[in-house]
Image (cartoon, grey):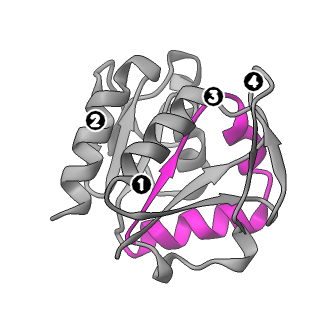
Amino acid sequence: MKKIAILLENLFDEHELIYPYHRLKETYEVHLVGTDKDTEYVSKSGLKVKSNHGSLDVKADDYAALFIPGGFSPDYMRRSNATRALVQEFDKQKKPIAAICHGPWMLASCCDLKGKEVTSFPSIKDDLINAGARWLDQEVVVAGNLITARNPGDLPAIMKKFLEIIEQ
């Protein structure tokens, strides 16, 4: 059974974590990878979710794909050298990486976005453009192994595309 990693940090958006988690669990083994293992992370509204693994303890080799939820959590994720290195390794291996809302902040910190089309929550548009990306206001944007979406309303579309790409 393929394994999928979902990154986890404080101030995650509940919808952007829970919806992908359950959709992916229908078919795959899903691991919640926090900065630290066995740690409770708290969402924007107080929901507590515990990590299965820490980013220092896992390798991109062990997974078929990666999902990065938004909220304000990507700002905390990118402060971790191990989490940034993990995302960089997924990208280096050209494994699917889906990022929604503020999730593309991690792509700006970890991936070569020069000339690639992406989308995100509008408030981080400048960060992505400054990282060399071409920002589009579209429901879902695919650029090679990177799949991005703007907000929780785009979850059905990004999950459909992400699942389709994982199965290729």
First reached walking from the N terminus: tag 1 or tag 2: 1
Pointer 3: what residue? 13
The residue tagged 1 is: 25
Q: Is residue 26 left or right of residue 80?
A: left
- Comes first in the chain, label 4 or label 1: 1
Residue 100, compared with residue 77, is above or below; it is: above
Above or below for 163 versus 95:
above
**Which residue type does callout 4 highlight?**
Lys
Quadrant hosting residue 136: top left
Instruction: Looking at the image, tell me whether mark 4 or mark 2 is earlier in sequence order.
Output: 4
The residue positioned 77% from the left and 59% from the top of the image is 35
Discs 3, 4 touching: Cβ within 8 Å = yes
In reply to whether residue 107 is colored magenta, the answer given is no
For mark 2, what is the residue?
141
Q: Position of residue 69 (x, y in %)?
A: 55, 39
Residues under labels 4 and 1: Cα distance? 23 Å
CA gap, disc 3 to disc 1? 18 Å
Amino acid at pointer 1: Lys
Residue bearing the label numbered 4 = 44
Residue at the image point whose x is 59% and y is 33% from the top? 70
Which range is magenta?
64-93
